[in-house]
Amino acid sequence: MPRLALVAALFASYAAPVRGQCNGSPALCERGYGTVSFVGTHNSYAVGSEDNLAVNQGHDVTQQLNDGVRMLQVQAHTKGTTIQLCHTSCDLLDGGSLLDYLRKVKTWMDANPQEVVSMLIVNIRNQPPTAFSSIFTQAGLADLAYTPVAPSVAVADWPTLGSMIESGKRLVIFMDNQAQYDVVSWIIDEFSNMWETGFNIVDPTLFNCQVNRTSGDPSTQLALINHFLNQVVVSFPAPFPERANVTNAATGEGSLGAEVGVCGEVIGRAPNFMLVDFYEYGGGSVFEVAASANGVTYNPTTPIAQPGGSSGGSTNGAGGTGTRDSAAASVFVPGSWMVSSLVLGGLGAALL
Ligand SMILES: *[C@@H]1O[C@H](CO)[C@@H](O)[C@H](O)[C@H]1NC(C)=O
Ligand SMILES: *[C@@H]1O[C@H](CO)[C@@H](O)[C@H](O)[C@H]1NC(C)=O
């Protein structure tokens, strides 16, 4: 055997992940990060009762990760000097500090060393990358953050999941604006690496796989689909949990599975990230769609969390009492996102 081949063989076995499992499957270890599909939670911190129209998820980030979510999208606001995870405004939904959220992610990642996780920060207050890096460091997550070789990486050039797990650099952090490679190289600029489909879809027949936002060449970028359906409530878009089982389904009109199929036709592959609301609706269908896109079997050892029961996470989670429709009609004031103080009794005083 030529010496070089022997060395290569030794190196290959050395580089193999410890337990031969990558995101739940040995088959994914050799796959490039850019060739894998991950289920993501839209506003992953916006957890609580479905009666609150600013809520997008029924279970907190730890449960999301336990169930198989591997892309966590957050909207970062500021509250005093703190970076706070809020939806539209911290008066409407306050999901707690970024630090507290990241500590949960850190605990989970430490307990699950064979998993690659991604995050997408919507930096709505245009904070500098150092405002975020210090919090990741405080949470103990900076050591797990993956640093790309360049500010933008072609979809085919991302490392394999196996090598990311082996190196321990298995948290991939994207941010939609203000990323600066020369300042914090592991907070990765979203739109020079990834494109997104449109969001705020209110007609399920309009889910497509068309590029809506990017600042690069979509043909060489990661792809993210926003597969959550909104409903219009008193002229404002709001999540639609009553239809989430259909929206999240593996088949059918307006389903996640159907949109991934359209991506196959339009871009010739499955999207990398699939952001959904109330991921638990469909009884695991979103994970089945991802497994099918990845060519692996979805074979959970335990059932995923049930719809309806919030497992905590949001400071506002326990509020809503009345029916969703009556809450909707009273909370939103046409013409603005203002919250009427008269109707907040049912949603909890914490909203103001
Ligand atoms: C992106 O989607 C929004 C609606 O969500 C639409 O108004 C806008 O025209 C779209 N832009 C592109 C470039 O497709
Ligand atoms: C969604 O849930 C409704 C109400 O429980 C049910 O009638 C319908 O069959 C479900 N659809 C799917 C695709 O699971």
Image (spheres, rainbow, N blue to C red):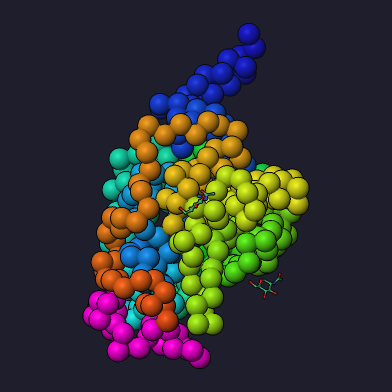
Inspect this view and state whether residue 203 appears: yes
Residue 76: percent from left, percent from top: 41, 71
Residue drawn at (60%, 69%) of the image: 202
Q: Does 77 sit above or below residue 121?
A: below
Whether residue 294 sits left or right of residue 95 in the image: it is right
Residue 23: percent from left, percent from top: 46, 37
Residue drawn at (31%, 73%) of the image: 322
The quadrant of the image that shows the N terminus is top right
Is 319 magenta? The answer is: no
Q: What stretch is highlighted in magenta?
A: 330-352
Q: Does 167 sit above or below residue 42?
A: above
Relative depth, front residue between 12 and 199: 199
Q: Does 61 sit above or below residue 167?
A: below
Is 332 magenta? The answer is: yes
Residue drawn at (62%, 62%) of the image: 204
Inspect this view and state whether residue 147 appears: no
Residue 42: percent from left, percent from top: 48, 61
Residue 61: percent from left, percent from top: 35, 54
Which of the 4 image quarters holds residue 21? top left
The quadrant of the image that shows the C terminus is bottom left
Relative depth, front residue between 293 and 345: 345
Image quarter for ligand 1 equals bottom right
